Image (cartoon, grey):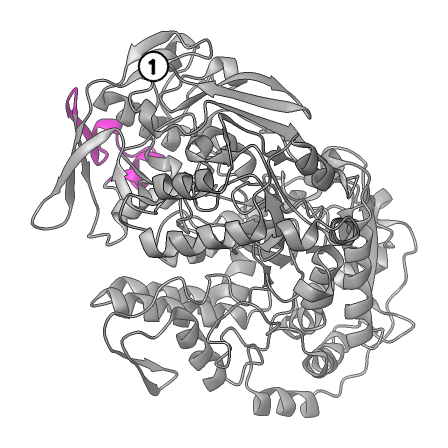
């Protein structure tokens, strides 16, 4: 099972939504999941279940004291597999049909059916995406790649910055200009001409804000955004996406594809060199460095290697120790010719090149740091800090001070210096504890762009800056979710005694049983008011803007030809042009599932709350209460099911959002579900409770909104595979299953 993939995007509930072109962590919105059973079936089940509960012996000791954080995972995989098959078996069966698709459109349609099937499990809920908030700044719009997938959105060397904050009028004009010029290769120069005519001057640096330091500097060893964002500008791949979202050559100069679609051969530049953090050349880049990069990726237990299973020939066999690396589908034909051999035709293969799984690594530098290859490899000092990696990209890291700054300078030996619009980038730390700091820093020029939270909006308006400077940021393809832990075993952080659960042993045991009841899970997630939750960070005016209602964005792909499927014995025909979300909605409607992932009036899957449904919460909870009674668990207002929710406790926004979760779910459930709000006092506590855990058994929560997913390539599989055991499987740890 694969351990990682791109953007397990940190969801620090801090709402430092820095500008559309900055990274920063974005808010999530905890949402509900809908029903999986037909209404007539659930009603019948409710009427037939009459067993009365017999109260269990009550153990009032604290769960945190009894269970602590010491857990022996000897049978963890077997237990995870059992729960997975029980809760996601239907999804996996639907997903398996995708491989038999006759064409790309049928593939998309079958993936949509699988995703719709998954929602019936009630295991998680899409919440929000990035963006959709008020922003202001000096960064010229669309001068950083905005492709929906891959890592290229963080290649900040292309950004164009002005010395003064760009007015809202000029910013919106430039966005419209990009819409007209995208694909022509002329936008950046035209934008500069326009701004020069308006009296703006340009600066040679870029100062974004950030909230979390990397936990490794080995780009091939992690899929976390806290690693991918800073490192994307340090290494080039074969092709990249430019500011106009065109896929253009980088280290590759051209490629050919065999007649059967299984062999891709790339010709490489011969003038690319590796340098160290001092800018000193350490090696020439050759095709063998791509082989070294891939082997290191496959060797790393926490790498995004699962993305390549079923794509590159021999990957799974190598990971399982059945073959040597020279039998895997990658070959350095000569110093400047690279060949990939696929397991099967992969229509999205070229789009995968924008992600770090296809970047090179200097074999010579890696071994000089004590690195070795093989499944029992050693990394030596490689990747321990910015001084122990090699660079072939436009920027090198010249200084890193934790929780302060990350400084990048132009790589003087970069093969394409003409692509740099800035020659220095300084990331500046902001933990979000001061809700006005990001706004003040942008005004002062300390940082170049910022998103505006509630406090900043009010201050901005009072200072007469709102109408002049503020616009709306674009949304992205990243989906933040609320995850339900169905197999919780610890009740304090795995690496400390932080964030102890207030539950008693009996409450902990009862809630674990409840979380394994599908009707209870559906009730829990149907009780969350996403819009009110989001409003705590972005305000009432914008509370719907960033709401997302499906894991794969509804408009991520569309059909290029008509497709007819048989779903639950019913024939469904979808015309060319049908969006992915429309197919999901048709399946959900046919199954009487109370979720709206597509809004026909808006012709969109974002911008409304399609999951919050108090009536559905109550009806599903009624079924759950009777089924739990049959298991000896009393659920009433005096004996609610207690759910632990941890949150950012060191900001003003964090507690507000946490209280929105509590009030919404407790009201919708009529008090039968109680939300315990457990504050994290600092970043280390917060991330150790969920985001930075490696295995599902380490997660210290029942409900977790700390993470999301952004696509690695241009196919819905990039989302769905995160919930498939034998592929990516990365997000299953959020559910208390498996590991990363």
Q: Nearer the viewer, residue 284 or 249?
A: 249
Q: Quadrant of residue 315?
A: top left
Residue 531 appears in view: yes
Q: Looking at the image, which residue is at 64% across and 72% down?
A: 522
Q: Which residue is mark 1?
A: 413
Residue 263 rendering spot, x and y as whole percentages: 14, 42
Task: Answer left or right for 20 relative to 454.
Answer: left
Residue 146 rendering spot, x and y as whole percentages: 42, 48
Q: Looking at the image, which residue is at 42% across and 52% down?
A: 148
Q: Is residue 562 above or below residue 472?
A: below
Total numbered circles: 1
Query: What secondary structure is marked by label 1?
Result: loop
Q: Looking at the image, which residue is at 27% across and 26% down?
A: 291
Q: Nearer the viewer, residue 229 or 638?
A: 229
Q: Is residue 92 above or below residue 461?
A: below
Q: Nearer the viewer, residue 574 or 311?
A: 574
Magenta span: 314-336
């Amino acid at each position: 099972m694969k351990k990682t993939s791109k953007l397990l995007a940190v969801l620090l509930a801090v709402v430092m939504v820095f500008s559309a072109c900055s990274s920063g962590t974005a808010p999530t919105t905890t949402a509900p999941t809908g029903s999986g059973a037909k209404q007539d079936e659930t009603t019948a089940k409710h009427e037939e279940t009459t067993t009365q509960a017999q109260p269990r012996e009550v153990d009032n000791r604290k769960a945190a004291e009894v269970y602590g954080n010491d857990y022996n995972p000897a049978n963890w995989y077997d237990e995870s597999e059992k729960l997975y098959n029980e809760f996601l078996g239907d999804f996996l069966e639907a997903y398996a049909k995708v491989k038999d698709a006759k064409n790309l459109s049928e593939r998309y349609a079958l993936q949509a059916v699988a995703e719709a099937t998954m929602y019936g499990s009630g295991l998680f809920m899409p919440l929000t995406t990035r963006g959709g908030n008020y922003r202001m700044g000096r960064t010229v719009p669309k001068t950083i790649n905005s492709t929906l997938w891959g890592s290229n959105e963080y290649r900040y060397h292309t950004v164009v910055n002005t010395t003064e904050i760009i007015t809202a009028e000029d910013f919106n004009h430039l966005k419209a200009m990009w819409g007209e010029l995208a694909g022509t290769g002329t936008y950046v120069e035209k934008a500069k001409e326009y701004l020069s005519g308006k009296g703006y001057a340009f600066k040679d640096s870029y100062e974004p804000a950030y909230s979390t330091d990397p936990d490794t500097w080995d780009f091939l060893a992690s899929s976390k955004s806290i690693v991918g964002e800073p490192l994307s500008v340090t290494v080039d791949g074969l092709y990249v996406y430019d500011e106009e979202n065109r896929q253009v050559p980088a280290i590759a100069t051209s490629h050919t594809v065999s007649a059967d679609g299984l062999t891709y051969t790339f010709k490489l530049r011969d003038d690319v060199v590796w340098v160290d953090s001092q800018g000193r050349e350490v090696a020439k880049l050759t095709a063998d460095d791509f082989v070294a990069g891939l082997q290191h990726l496959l060797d790393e237990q926490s790498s995004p290697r699962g993305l390549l299973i079923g794509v590159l020939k021999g990957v799974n066999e190598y990971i399982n120790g059945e073959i040597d690396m020279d039998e895997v589908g990658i070959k350095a034909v000569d110093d400047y010719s690279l060949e990939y051999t696929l397991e099967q035709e992969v229509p999205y293969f070229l789009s995968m090149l924008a992600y770090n799984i296809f970047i090179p690594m200097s074999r010579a530098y890696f071994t000089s740091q004590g690195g070795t290859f093989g499944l029992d490899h050693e990394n030596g000092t490689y990747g321990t800090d910015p001084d122990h990696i090699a660079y072939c990209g436009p920027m090198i890291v010249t200084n890193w001070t934790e929780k302060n700054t990350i400084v990048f300078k132009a790589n003087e030996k970069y093969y394409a210096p003409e692509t740099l619009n800035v020659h220095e980038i300084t990331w500046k730390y902001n933990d979000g504890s001061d809700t006005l700091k990001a706004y003040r820093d942008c005004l002062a020029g300390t940082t170049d762009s910022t998103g505006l939270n509630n406090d900043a909006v009010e201050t901005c308006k009072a200072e007469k800056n709102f109408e002049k400077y503020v616009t709306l940021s674009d949304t992205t393809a990243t989906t933040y979710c609320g995850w339900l832990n169905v197999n919780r075993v610890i009740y304090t952080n795995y690496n400390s005694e932080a964030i102890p659960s207030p539950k008693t042993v009996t409450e902990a045991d009862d809630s674990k049983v409840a979380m394994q009841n599908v009707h209870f899970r559906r009730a829990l997630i149907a009780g969350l008011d996403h819009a009110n939750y989001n409003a705590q960070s972005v305000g009432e005016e914008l509370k719907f803007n960033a709401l997302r209602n499906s894991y794969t964005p509804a408009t991520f792909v569309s059909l290029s030809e008509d497709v007819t499927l048989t779903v639950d014995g019913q024939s469904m025909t979808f015309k060319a042009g049908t969006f992915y979300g429309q197919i999901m909605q048709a399946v959900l409607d046919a199954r009487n599932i109370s979720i709206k992932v597509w809004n026909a009036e808006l012709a969109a899957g974002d911008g409304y709350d399609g999951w919050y449904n108090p009536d559905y919460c109550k009806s599903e909870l009624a079924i759950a209460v009777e089924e739990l009674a049959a298991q000896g668990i009393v659920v009433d207002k005096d004996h609610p099911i207690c759910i632990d929710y941890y949150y950012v406790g060191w900001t003003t926004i964090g507690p507000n959002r946490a209280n929105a979760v509590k009030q919404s779910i407790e009201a919708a459930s009529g008090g039968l579900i109680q939300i315990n709000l457990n504050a994290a006092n600092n970043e280390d506590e917060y991330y150790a409770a969920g985001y930075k855990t490696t295995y599902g058994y380490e997660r210290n929560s029942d409900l977790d909104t700390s993470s999301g997913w952004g696509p690695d390539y241009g196919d819905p599989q990039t989302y769905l595979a995160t919930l498939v055991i034998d592929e990516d499987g990365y997000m299953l740890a959020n559910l208390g299953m498996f590991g990363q």
